[in-house]
Image: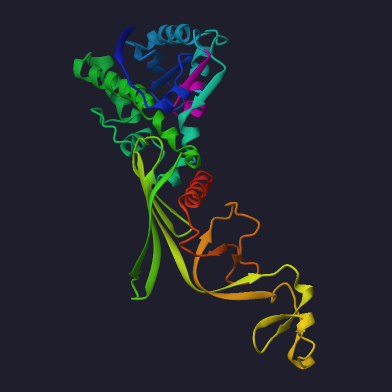
Amino acid sequence: MQHWKNTYPYTPHSVEFDYFTEDAFLYDIETTGLSARHHQIYLIGCAYRSGGKITIHQYFAESPEDESCILREFLRQASAFSSVITFNGKRFDEPFLRERCDKHHIPWEDYPENHLDIYQKCKPFKKLLSLPSLKQKSIEQFLGITRDDRYDGGELIRVYQSYLETRDADALHLLQLHNYEDVAGMITILPIFAYRDLGSLALQIHSIEAHNYSDYEGQPQTELLLEGSLGEALPAPVRLHLFDCYIILNKETFRASIPLFSGTMRHYLPNYKDYVYLPLDDMIVLKELASCIAKDKKQPAKPANCYVKKEGLFLCLPPKLTITEDACVFYPEYKAPLRYLLYDATNMNPIFFEQYLKCLLRHSSDL
């Protein structure tokens, strides 16, 4: 068995301390195949944090007979911690380890109970961040993390088999490097969890500007352009498209485009029994004022036609945005899914739009 140890200083993104605590033990295994019944573990890399220093241990099986040794060393290290961190370890690494330990009659009871699987926890981010896949290397690329290693675990099986025959130093370096960068990479992708709750960002709007432009059909359109700060630094920029709004979150700032819809909308009145509807005029009148109108020109108002029409520019509201009870809400038609407010530059203030954007970002986390 070979044992490699490396300790290095590390300044983490603040969100990492929420996960990679000093009680957490991070690890990754390399195997000769996917079946624990028919294949073995030949390399285990693990890491822990002490203050601002990271220590990585790697246990390498110089021969198939060394597997039990590296398993015992791994469990001896893991037993000092209360939780483990893996990437897809709940489905692969942990079950594989358990079965190989059973084969060698190695006790398992000291293995930590708590398990954070980065892969499982990252699933909500795939669509949000437009990731091509949830592979560790895809997340690293999104975060701007580069590697020297160019292999995947499957490709290195032959390298290990070749090493057992030749003891080639270059082959050994490739095996060690891949596992080392998998372990170190898991630490450096933990900032991905900064996107777990974008709606909690302490947004501050610095500018709001109405912008007129022509769309691809040459029709005049109006949008609101917002700029401001995020309140904390994100690890990498992200572009979001939500309810026809575009939001670009840079590391510490944001830009947003919110469309305004031009046309006629309807404000529906709840007390429809107090009105009559005039079909020819498409309008409502209070019953007490409609006594002089011919019976054939009016009818009792219903929830679907008891509305007041308004023409102008309208702002679409996110479904979960809370507004004041006295706000006049408009709809394009009865029971339409989205609500609108009449746009008025005098009463649309930064505080309102900060809540507006936070609501959109909370929705993005639920996608």
| Rendered view: 240 above or below 75 | below
Examine the structure image and report whether residue 76 is included in the region drawn in magenta. no
Q: Residue at x 57, y 17 (%)?
A: 113
The residue that appears at 38% across and 26% down in the rendered structure is: 186
Residue 331 shown left or right of residue 207 in the figure: right
Relative depth, front residue between 128 and 15: 15
- Choose top left, top right, bottom left or bottom right for residue 252: top left
Q: Quadrant of the N terminus?
A: top left
Range shown magenta:
82-94
Percent position (x, y) of residue 327? 61, 60
Magenta-drawn stretch contains 86: yes
Q: Is residue 238 visible?
A: no
Residue beneath the point at 46% across and 39% down: 201
Q: Quadrant of residue 46?
A: top left
Residue 209's x, y, as percent? Answer: 37, 59
Tell me what residue is drawn at x 30 percent, y 30 percent: 155
- From this viewpoint, is residue 362 visible? yes
